Amino acid sequence: MPKRLLKWLFYGALLTGAFTFLYPFIWMIMATLKPEIEVSNLSLIPSKFTLQSYINVFQRIPISRAFLNSLLVSSIVTGSVLVFSSITGYALSRLQFRGREVIFGIILFTMMLPFQITLIPMYVLMVKFGWVDTYQALIVPGMISTFGILVFRQAYKNIPQDLIDSARLDGCSELRIIFQIVWPLSIPTMVTVGIITFMNTWNDVLWPIIVIRKTEMMTMPQTVALFAVGGQADAQMGSILAAATLLAIPVVIAYVIFQRHFIDSMATSGLKG
Amino acid sequence: MKRPNTVVAPYFLITPYILHFLLIVAFPVVFSLILTVHRWNLLSPMTWVGGTNILTLISDPLFWKSLWNTLRFLIIHIPLQIAIALVLAEILNQQLRARGFFRAVFFLPVVISGVVVTILWKQLYASENGVFNEVLLALGMGRVEWLTSPLIAMPAIAIMATWKNVGLYVILLLAGLQSIPKQVYEAATIDGANRIQQFFKITIPMLNPVLLTVIILSTINGFSLFIEPYVMTGGGPLNSTLSMNLFIYKQAFCFYKMGYAATLGFVLAVVVFAVVAVQRKFFEKEF
């Protein structure tokens, strides 16, 4: 096959792919700006632009509260994972102590454990603690991630021992060494763990559906999912799609800004898992 | 001489992890085991039922149905995903313009919440006025009952899941392709191997570890199928999209059969391990 032709074929395939992945999203956004009766039209351009679908969403469900809940939960979980996973990762890679290999084994075991095994007892635990319908139920289970520990452990192996030794001679505690010396040297790793954790927490929906029943405590994906299956939308597709669009927007903005980091982070986590 | 600081410090540093592990892994696993031999609705005290849960499971047609549904999902999803991801990754590995743009576009559905994707596709699949059916009608073909036919609903969900996840596997395979040394291909070209032969004799075998990762990851993802049927079909029609996870969820949180649900969780975990083990074995043998 001539090289030129092959090249055109490749571009054709890439463009078809791009169209397939982008068009549904563009269609969705345009559908939310149409009057309800036009929502399912194939044409992208509405006869008149209207924000009615969005107004409906804001009137019917507490979506801004849900957004704040999700933001709060995802931020705290991410901060906590960065702090505690890096501390654990540091201990495992840079300190000698009895039982280190046992801990490492436990971490690998935990990573392989399907969540279906722990789901039911975790729920029971939340009930016994009185944490159903609280932020604790959404935050505490995610506070340390084994994935984060493994990534930090690997990254910290490359930090020169001299730096750590001289800090110790200066009287630095291990915690100060982690936060003032190790952290600034491992920013890319922190970005990776941060993005993955934030995204997974933001997008998780099974766990919130189980432990949160009160409307005002619900996370954003949960609120939108229940809006789509429940009766509140009055089967108005425009409103449901508007709620979905609102849910997608924060992630899309973050993705457009940090696109490269997102892709690299997910590739790392994919290969690790 | 070791200062006391460095002797105590490690244990101090790993304490948060240990506490977290005891709370969300050790206790739940042990408690889950206890639950499998009990009947419990959360309110009244637990009653010991021995092997009843597992026997109920074996004779529960809905369990087998959900297992079969999940396998049906995987049988469509995995080959489709690998084929598309391989083609796209192979093309992105060529010297072409705007590769970064295409890579970013293919990856977009991966970062977007499954809830968004499911809501969007539910509308695309809608029987009346859904985009797919409108296109089919415009082309002079008949409607397809995407989500209301027991035969087609699960494949429809598998297609949607492929669309959502394939970008991740494109990136993983692309990284794998880039790690194959160029000299191997040059040598093959000199020996007269054409592109297709090169693809099957060099690319596929060299990609073997990445392919295994892709298969295992999509298997594990497939067994966690929950929100897609939950939003799209509620498990219907006629339970044809009832995934194992959705089944467990319903047993636990609609019927409050905690012991039975815990048993299902264990069995599902065993099934996942078994399937992954078979895949590993197959890959070690084949290549």
Image: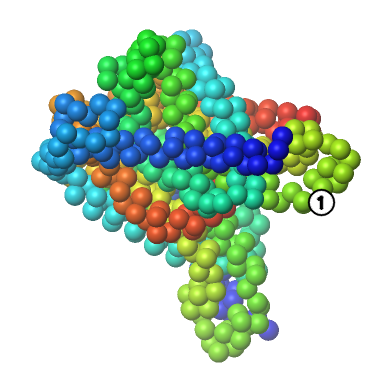
The reply, left or right, for residue A177 in relation to residue A77 is right
The reply, left or right, for residue B222 in relation to residue A80 is right
User: Which percent across, then down, holds residue A202?
Assistant: 35, 48
User: Which percent across, then down, holds residue A60?
Assistant: 12, 38
Dot 1 amino acid type: Gln
Quadrant position of the N terminus of chain B in the picture:
bottom right
User: Which percent across, then down, holds residue B230?
Assistant: 34, 27
Q: Which residue is mark 1?
A: B183
The reply, left or right, for residue A5 in relation to residue B221 is right
Give the residue drawn at x 71%, y 51%: B179
Query: For this rendering, which residue is in front, A117 or A229?
Result: A229
Query: For this rendering, which residue is in front, B234 or B272?
Result: B234
Residue A198 falls in which quadrant of the image?
A: bottom left
Give the residue drawn at x 44%, y 29%: B160
User: Which percent across, then down, holds residue A26?
Assistant: 33, 39
Query: For this rendering, which residue is in front, A212 or A127?
Result: A212
In the rendered view, tell whether residue B75 sits above or below residue A69.
above
In the rendered view, tell whether residue A92 sits above or below residue B73.
below
Query: For this rendering, which residue is in front, A38 or A153?
Result: A38
Residue A67 in view (yes/no): yes
Judge the density around disc 1: few (<14), some (14-19), many (≥20) Cα neighbours within 10 Å. few
Residue A242 falls in which quadrant of the image?
A: top left
Residue that lies at the very extreme toward the left in this rendered image: A59
What secondary structure is found at the residue carrying circle 1? helix
